[in-house]
Amino acid sequence: MTGVSRETLARLARHLKLLVRWQKRINLVGTATLADPWRRHVLDSAQLAPLVPAGARLADLGSGAGFPGLVLAIMRGGPVDLIESDARKAAFLAEAVRATGAPAAVHNARAETLTLKADVVAARACAPLDRLLGLALPLLAPGGVCLFLKGARAEEEIEAARARWRIAVRRHPSLSAPEGVVLELGDLAHAA
């Protein structure tokens, strides 16, 4: 990864080393993805960094193994809220935050129960777009945006979501997967 300090790379490596160790006990990521974790997980997450305004508060829905939220906390500084309802995954995240010194808070809770407000809500491999928007809207500060990493079916998900949501959509090609896309969504509201 170019343009990233040695210290940041070392912190990202600590995150991946911890992931491999914990993966033996709990399923954090697809096992096959560990053959190329820098591209499949770190680069995939890091590509969101230029889309997050400086000083913005970020919330990561369904943080799981810390992608993209923990990677972004390590790379750009905080504040990042890692939201994970699975207690085992939240325990992993807490250990990863401690081990990397990332400026992040772990919330072992369902997104629907939280009252925090974020400038950016991110998610990766969490839920279909229609459901993600429902989870994100209560967490978004006024003028906030969503950054969702999606795969080859992104256009289908956008069309399905537009039945219930009004959204402004910007698409960014994925840097880590040719079929992937980063959806930057703003002006989120329920459809009339």
Image (cartoon, rainbow, N blue to C red):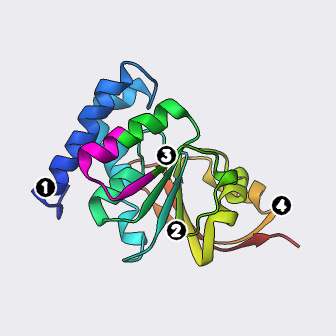
Residue 139 shown in magenta:
no
Q: Which mark is residue 163?
A: 4
Q: Which mark is residue 7?
A: 1
Instruction: Please name the amino acid that badge 3 sits on.
Output: Ser
Q: Residues within 10 Å of mark 2 (few under 14, many from 20)?
A: many
Q: Please report the residue visible at 68 percent of the width from the left and 55 percent of the height from the top.
A: 135
Which residue position is annotated with label 2?
120
Q: Residue 26 placed where, x, y %? A: 44, 23
Instruction: Please name the amino acid that badge 1 sits on.
Output: Glu
Q: Residues within 10 Å of mark 1 (few under 14, many from 20)?
A: few
In the rendered view of the protein, which quadrant contains the N terminus? bottom left
Residue most extreme to the top: 24
Residue most extreme to the left: 6
Q: Nearer the viewer, mark 1 or mark 4?
A: 1
Mark 3–mark 2 distance (CA, rounded to whole Å)? 14 Å
Q: Residues within 10 Å of mark 4 (few under 14, many from 20)?
A: few
Secondary structure of the residue carrying tag 3 is loop
Residue segment shown in magenta: 95-105
Say if residue 47 shows up in the picture. yes
Mark 4–mark 2 distance (CA, rounded to whole Å)? 23 Å
**134 shown above or below 15:** below
Q: Please report the residue visible at 19 percent of the width from the left and 56 percent of the height from the top.
A: 8
Q: Nearer the viewer, mark 4 or mark 2?
A: 2
